[in-house]
Amino acid sequence: MARYLGPVCRLCRREGLKLFLKGERCYTDKCAIERRNYPPGAHGQARTRFSEFSIRLREKQKVKRIYGLLEAQFAKYFELAERMPGITGENLLVLLERRLDQVVYRLGFATSPAQARQLVRHGHIEVDGQVVTIPSLLLKVNQVVSVTAKSRQKKVVLDAVELAQRRGAPPWLLLEREQFRGALRSLPARADMTMPISEKLIVEHYSR
């Protein structure tokens, strides 16, 4: 499975935004954005004039990095969103939020999307009582996601649950923290997605 293996704090600095890719570190003053809030590289602090193309490209890159996807994966989600009824940009965000690794992260069983993906791949997560090892699985409404019984005392899971109490679960998810399980209560509404994303720019980028 192809994935980004470089320094993730560099990605946050490139986008000029906390993407919460580093888990607990993102909530401390050690966060790279707090210490060096400018793009990485020798010319990071230089003034840059952005074209319309670069603005749209940056928005697409930002969303790819939030959800930990590579270009081909992201393009497939966009094609699927285009074929669905409704607004393409909103369809895209809903599809991304329905991924199993994203739901595990949003429920607070992992401190970052990358850690959630690893928990799924290593067989620590169940869907409707069955172990699932596919992070990209698109969940349906009312499907139950839980940590396997043998993994509930793992330090990474307990630390994640403790950290998650600060941010809570989004309204489209039903969380039962003490039972280490949750469910997709409904499809997420655009108004409930709080990350500063302009999906219209992504649609314009692919429509050029």
Image (spheres, rainbow, N blue to C red):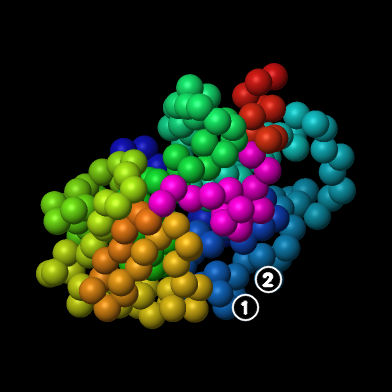
- Residue flagged by tag 1: what amino acid is it? Asp
For label 2, the SS is helix
20, 4: nearer the viewer: 20
Give the answer, above or below, for where 25 lies relative to 206: below
What's the magenta region?
186-199
**To which quarter of the image does residue 51 belong?**
top right
Give the answer, above or below, for where 72 lies relative to 135: above
Label 1 crowding class (10 Å Cα cut-off): few <14, some 14-19, many 20+?
few
Q: Residue at x 21, y 47 (%)?
A: 133
Mark 2 to mark 1 CA distance (whole Å): 6 Å
Label 2 crowding class (10 Å Cα cut-off): few <14, some 14-19, many 20+?
some
**To which quarter of the image does residue 207 belong?**
top right
Residue 108 image position (x, y, % from top left) = 38, 68
Residue 47 image position (x, y, % from top left) = 87, 48
Furthest residue in direction top, as rendered: 208
Give the residue at mark 2.
34
145, 22: nearer the viewer: 145
Quadrant in the picture for the N terminus: top left
Give the residue at mark 1.
29
Residue 106 image position (x, y, % from top left) = 42, 61
Residue 70 image position (x, y, % from top left) = 47, 36
- Residue flagged by tag 2: what amino acid is it? Glu
Is residue 112 among what the camera can see? no
Q: Are marks 2 and 1 in contact (CB under 8 Å)?
A: yes
Q: Is residue 65 left or right of residue 174?
A: right
Is residue 194 magenta-colored? yes
